[in-house]
Image (spheres, grey):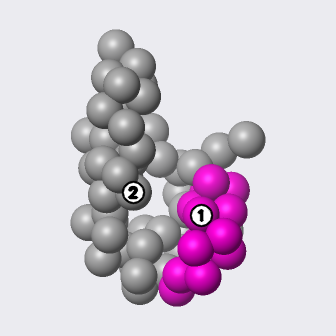
């Protein structure tokens, strides 16, 4: 996996979600997700990374690894 933009696209395709759906789940803005997926923005803020993973119900064990 190259980046979070690619991750978002993959999650949305596998889950049959729209950007608006992913935004609602993660608390990240739809416009931010659009820029993330297109490569205009990058997700580097650890708080936003945790917010995204938590919104997608990634097991806490994995989010603790990210924040370490």
**Tally of numbered discs:** 2
Report the disc number at residue 55: none
Name which residue lies at 41% across and 82% down.
21
Disc 1, SS? helix
Query: Within 10 angstroms of label 2, few (less than 14), some, or many (20 or more) residues?
Result: few
Q: For this rendering, which residue is in front, 52 or 62?
A: 62
Q: Is residue 19 left or right of residue 13?
A: left
Q: Quadrant of residue 24?
A: bottom left
Query: Within 10 angstroms of label 1, few (less than 14), some, or many (20 or more) residues?
Result: some
Q: What is the quadrant of the C terminus in the image?
A: top left
Q: Is residue 10 visible?
A: yes
Q: Which span of residues is magenta-colored?
A: 5-18
Q: Is residue 48 visible?
A: no
Name which residue lies at 40% across and 44% down.
58
Location of mark 2 (residue)? 56
Place of residue 48 in the rendered image (x, y in percent of width and height, measured from the top left): 32, 47
Q: Is residue 13 left or right of residue 15?
A: right
Q: Residue furthest top?
A: 68
Q: Quadrant of residue 32?
A: bottom left
Location of mark 1 (residue)? 11
Q: What is the quadrant of the N terminus in the image?
A: top right
Vertical order, 17 against 66 (above or below):
below
């Amino acid at each position: 996996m190259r980046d979070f933009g690619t991750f978002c696209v993959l999650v949305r395709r596998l889950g049959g979600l729209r950007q608006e759906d992913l935004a609602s789940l993660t608390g990240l803005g739809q416009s931010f997700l659009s820029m993330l997926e297109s490569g205009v923005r990058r997700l580097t803020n650890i708080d936003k990374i945790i917010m995204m993973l938590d919104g997608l119900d990634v097991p806490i064990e994995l989010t603790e690894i990210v924040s370490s």
